[in-house]
Image: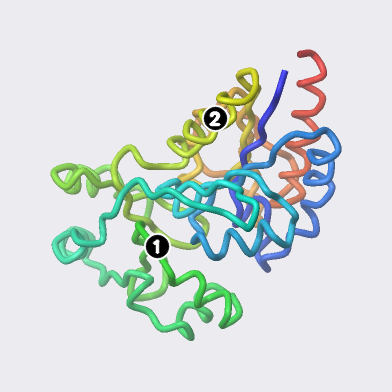
């Protein structure tokens, strides 16, 4: 049976210093077995094409939390966008600010230098991170994120706009309701199911914006964070012992042992 492994990027495939070295054993194992590694990230299209090029991964990927899907072509990647919410932000940002009592700064309003300072990215990669096509990541005035325990109430306020907020490794994100990493999994599965038998699927992630992706696959791995904690989520997921990209490789090895039975 054909299999697909989906993965988050920041905090899962990449460590806190944006290195994928510790994930290479898992990446190479998937390559050896001929299993596609489809990345689904809050990163931009340009960031993802650069990363996939470095890793020699020419498979479909999701960017901006699944609001865009990229497909491999002979000369690179084409992409499809599934929402554009930017025209709603003049109303939505003040609404979130009034409820939270925090000043909100969408990433596109920050300078490249500010993004580099907040993320630790190089200026070149900070510039790529700013080039959003459809989603709206943001930070608070202190450069942090809103606490997760206020999300339910904020999402009630955003319901009339058909929007939700979620939390990634470094930013909060405003997204179209129903357009998330789980949506990206389904779109990529559709792409493969036009060609092969319905696949056995797995996914690895460490943040709350990964939960829809984890719920959409047959084997879901929650990767331990660099501080030793796990996100608070469903107990029936599989939790890795190792952190970050080590945990990613641990998840791949476990998945390889499972698919031997199919």
Q: Quadrant of the N terminus?
A: top right
Going by the image, does 28 lie left or right of 234? right
Query: Picture coordinates of residue 83 (x, y %)?
Result: 31, 49
Going by the image, does 53 lie left or right of 253? left
Q: Which badge, 2 or 1, comes first in the chain's sequence?
A: 1
Q: What residue occupies the far top of the structure in this picture?
A: 262
Q: How is the image coloured?
A: rainbow
Is residue 109 shown above or below 237?
A: below
- Report how many numbered discs are placed on residues in the image: 2
Q: Residue at x 83, y 45 (%)?
A: 28
Quick one: SS at disc 1? loop
Q: Residue at x 55, y 46 (%)?
A: 71
Is residue 209 shown above or below 171?
A: above
Going by the image, does 101 lie left or right of 197? left
Q: What residue occupies the far front of the structure in this picture?
A: 74
Query: Picture coordinates of residue 19 (x, y %)?
Result: 72, 64
Q: Quadrant of residue 189?
A: top right
Quick one: SS at disc 2? helix
Is residue 50 shown above or below 56?
A: below
| Residue ID for mark 1 | 145
Estimate how packed mark 2 is, as few (under 14), some (14 to 19) or many (20 or more) residues with alpha carbons within 10 Å: some
Q: Quadrant of the C terminus?
A: top right
Front disc: 2 or 1? 2
Q: CA distance from mark 2 to mark 1?
A: 32 Å
Q: Residue at x 69, y 60 (%)?
A: 53
| Residue ID for mark 2 | 189
Of residues 53 and 91, the one nearer the viewer is 53
């Amino acid at each position: 049976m054909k299999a697909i492994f989906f993965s988050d990027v920041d905090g899962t495939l990449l460590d806190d210093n944006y290195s994928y070295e510790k994930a290479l054993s898992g990446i190479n194992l998937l390559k050896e077995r001929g299993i596609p590694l489809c990345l689904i990230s809050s990163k931009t299209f340009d960031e993802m094409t650069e990363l996939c090029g470095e890793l020699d991964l020419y498979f479909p990927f999701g960017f901006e939390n699944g609001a865009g899907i990229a497909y491999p072509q002979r000369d690179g990647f084409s992409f499809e966008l599934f929402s554009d919410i930017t025209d709603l932000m003049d109303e939505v940002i003040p609404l979130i600010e009034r409820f939270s009592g925090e000043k909100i700064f969408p990433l596109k309003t920050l300078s490249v230098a500010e993004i580099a300072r907040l993320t630790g990215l190089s200026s070149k990669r900070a510039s790529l991170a700013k080039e959003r096509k459809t989603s709206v990541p943001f930070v608070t005035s202190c450069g942090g994120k809103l606490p997760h325990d206020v999300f339910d109430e904020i999402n009630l306020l955003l319901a009339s706009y058909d929007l939700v907020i979620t939390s990634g490794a470094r930013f909060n994100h405003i997204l179209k309701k129903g357009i998330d990493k789980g949506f990206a999994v389904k779109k990529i599965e559709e792409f493969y199911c036009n060609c092969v038998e319905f696949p056995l699927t797995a996914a690895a992630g460490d943040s709350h914006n990964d939960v829809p992706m984890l719920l959409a696959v047959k084997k879901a791995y929650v990767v331990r964070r660099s501080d030793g904690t796990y996100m608070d989520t469903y107990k029936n997921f599989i939790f890795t012992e190792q952190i970050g990209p080590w945990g990613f490789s641990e998840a791949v090895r476990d998945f390889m042992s499972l698919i031997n039975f199919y």
